[in-house]
Image: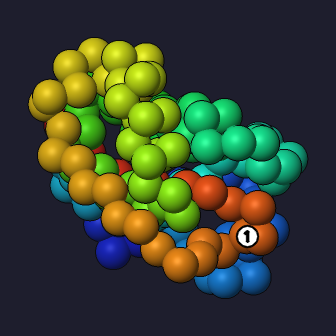
Amino acid sequence: MQHQNKETQALGMPWEDDYGYAQAVKKGDTVWIAGQLGHDEKGVLAQGMEAQMKQTYANIKTLLSRFNMTMDDVVEEVLYVLDMQTAFEARRDNKATFYTNPKSVASTIVVVSGLALPDQLVEIKIVARQ
């Protein structure tokens, strides 16, 4: 969808209409990806931090590809997590599967008291630029 020089993308999840937001917005050469979580195409959450994190990055890759972008275009990520140690280890141990050069991304990880869905363990927000 395009309006006001913005292009938006969705994943077809029911909460997009319920809450009322775009999963991703592109304006100019920059894409902002709303906090993503580790659900599959049916909205089912993966089990465990590592599995949710891997699925979350897969969803991010899907959204980026719709703008003809890749993970190499990511300049910033913010991870919201329920458990710092488990999340830190999952991100650290899998960084090379998420990014070609993990040191090229500004990354922040923050512990929060809760996330949108009951079994959700991680949410990741992205900014990418071509």
Give the vertical position of 105 relative to 80 (above or below): above
Q: Residues within 10 Å of mark 1 (few under 14, many from 20)?
A: few
Q: Quadrant of residue 33?
A: bottom left
Residue 65 % position (x, y)? 46, 32
Assign the C terminus to one quadrant of the image.
Answer: top left
Residue at 42% x, 67% y is 111
Which of the colour schemes (rainbow, by chain, secondary structure, one colour) is used?
rainbow
Which SS class for mark 1?
loop
Please name the residue that numbered disc 1 is placed on: 117
Q: Is residue 123 visible?
A: no
Front-lying residue, 16 or 120: 120
Residue at 51% x, 58% y is 83
- 92 sits left or right of 13 in the view: left
Count of picture labels: 1
Give the vertical position of 6 relative to 10 (above or below): below
Q: Is residue 87 visible?
A: yes
- 41 sits left or right of 19 in the view: right
Residue extending farthest to the front is 85
Give the vertical position of 75 relative to 27 (above or below): above
* Amino acid type at image mark 1: Leu
Residue at 43% x, 35% y is 89
Residue at 36% x, 30% y is 92
Front-lying residue, 91 or 126: 91
Residue 50 % position (x, y)? 60, 35
Residue extending farthest to the bottom is 19
Residue 57 % position (x, y)? 51, 37
Residue 40 % position (x, y)? 77, 41
Give the vertical position of 89 relative to 93 (above or below): below
- 62 sits left or right of 108 in the view: right
